[in-house]
């Protein structure tokens, strides 16, 4: 792996769907507690899930997978849960939460994740407010999700770089300058 370009390694990881996006630690605890207490059908649980880009991304990815080709895209959490079924949606969320607690949740992610999460929350709240303010109530939840996911590429890149940095062959410290350069030049892709 050490003889290949970093961009190529990251692209391969993304294409192979080998990355687990980290859930915000506070939300992770709340979501897992709700699931453990059997509140899988509660609107409170799905509201918590709707506040985390990693969980929404995983739900939308499953609900809009090639298996459902030809159907309209699921554009809200309700649509994704309806399409997947409550049991499967909960399993997807639970699996993503379990994987978030693993070894990938290390310093690189913990250093950048709080500001990314806060930024996403700000955009999501602003997008929902704008939709409501200008009379687009029917799509205000979609606007929220769009705002929350608008920079999901940054979280994906951080997860990939964290995995690369911790890989047995490469095992290296990624400089702050390199991390910021990769994020700023590649996150839109």
Image (cartoon, grey):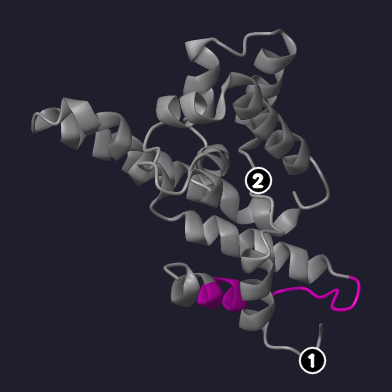
* Mark 2 or mark 1: whose residue is earlier in sequence: 1
Give, as a single range, the part of the protein colored magenta: 168-182
The label number, if any, that marks residue 180 in the structure image: none
Position in image of residue 41 (x %, y %): 56, 11
> Which residue ends up furthest to the front in the rendered image?
70
Position in image of residue 33 (x %, y %): 70, 16
Spatial CA span between label 2 and label 1: 28 Å
In this rendering, the answer to whether 161 lies above or below 33 is: below
Kindly identify the residue that appears in the image at 28 percent across and 38 percent down.
Answer: 143
Q: Is residue 133 left or right of residue 51?
A: left
The residue to which callout 1 is attached is 3
Position in image of residue 19 (x %, y %): 69, 57
Q: Can residue 175 be seen in this view?
A: no
> Which residue ends up furthest to the left in the rendered image?
134
Q: Is residue 49 visible?
A: yes
Q: Out of 107 and 103, give the one closest to the viewer.
A: 103
Quadrant containing the N terminus in the rendered view: bottom right
Kindly identify the residue that appears in the image at 46 percent across and 42 percent down.
Answer: 118
């Amino acid at each position: 792996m050490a003889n290949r370009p970093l961009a190529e390694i990251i692209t391969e990881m993304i294409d192979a769907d080998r990355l687990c996006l980290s859930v915000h630690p506070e939300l992770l605890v709340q979501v897992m507690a709700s699931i453990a207490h059997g509140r899988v059908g509660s609107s409170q649980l799905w509201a918590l899930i709707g506040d985390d880009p990693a969980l929404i991304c995983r739900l939308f990815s499953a609900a809009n997978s090639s298996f459902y080709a030809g159907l309209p895209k699921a554009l809200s959490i309700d649509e994704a849960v309806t399409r997947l079924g409550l049991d499967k949606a909960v399993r997807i969320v639970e699996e993503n939460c379990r994987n978030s607690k693993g070894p990938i949740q290390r310093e690189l992610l913990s250093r950048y994740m709080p500001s990314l999460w806060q930024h996403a929350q700000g955009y999501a709240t602003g997008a929902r407010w704008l939709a409501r303010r200008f009379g687009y109530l029917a799509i205000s939840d979609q606007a929220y999700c769009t705002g929350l996911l608008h920079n999901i590429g940054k979280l994906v890149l951080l997860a990939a770089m964290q995995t690369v940095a911790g890989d047995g062959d490469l095992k290296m410290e990624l400089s702050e300058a390199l991390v910021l350069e990769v994020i700023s030049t590649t996150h839109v892709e």
